[in-house]
């Protein structure tokens, strides 16, 4: 075996406790949607996405939520949250 070990990206990724908390919020959101409260589920999911994006943007490399680069994580989280809200409420306006 070589004395030089390859860089393992998981060493620099987020904190498992925070990631599990986000997973639990997503599961709760799915359960709320299954109970027929789609607006509440959509808002909960969207706010979670926006908050994780903002946490990554503000805390940068100290953030407990890391997937890729700071810019990518922040953009995806914030854009996903805003996009979900826009799509949900635009569909509601059509009905």
Image (cartoon, grey):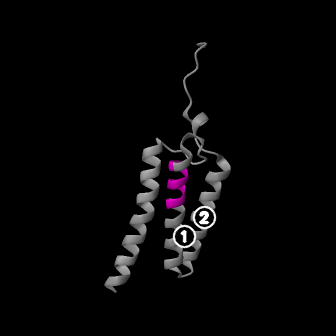
Is 3 contained in the magenta span? no
Give the residue at x 40% y 59%: 79
Give the residue at x 47% y 43%: 70
From the image, tell me which residue sits under label 1.
Answer: 44
- 71 vs 41, left or right, is left
User: How many labels, in total?
Assistant: 2
Image quadrant for the N terminus? top right
Q: Position of residue 59 (x, y in %)?
A: 57, 46
Q: In this view, does 82 lie above or below 72?
A: below
From the image, tell me which residue sits under label 2.
Answer: 25
Query: Magenta segment, which residues?
Result: 50-57
Q: In the current view of this chain or complex, which residue is farthest to the left?
A: 94
Q: Is residue 71 above or below residue 45?
A: above
Image quadrant for the C terminus? bottom left
| Residue closer to the observer: 23 or 69 | 69
Q: Where is residue 31 in the image (x, y as percent from the top left)?
A: 59, 73
Most common secondary structure along the magenta stretch: helix
Q: Where is residue 22 in the image (x, y as percent from the top left)?
A: 60, 58
Query: Crowdedness of circle 2 by 10 Å Cα count: few (<14), some, many (20+)?
Result: some
Q: Which of marks 2 and 1 is nearer the N terminus?
A: 2
Using the numbered discs, state the Cα–Cα distance from disc 2 to disc 1 in whole angstroms. 8 Å
């Amino acid at each position: 075996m070589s004395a030089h070990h390859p860089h393992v990206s998981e060493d620099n990724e987020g904190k498992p406790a925070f990631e599990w908390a986000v997973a639990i919020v997503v599961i709760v959101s799915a359960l709320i949607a299954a109970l027929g409260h789609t607006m509440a589920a959509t808002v909960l999911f969207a706010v979670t996405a926006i908050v994780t994006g903002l946490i990554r943007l503000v805390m940068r490399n100290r953030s407990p939520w890391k997937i890729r680069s700071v810019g990518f994580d922040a953009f995806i989280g914030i854009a996903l949250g805003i996009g979900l809200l826009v799509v949900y409420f635009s569909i509601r306006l059509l009905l």
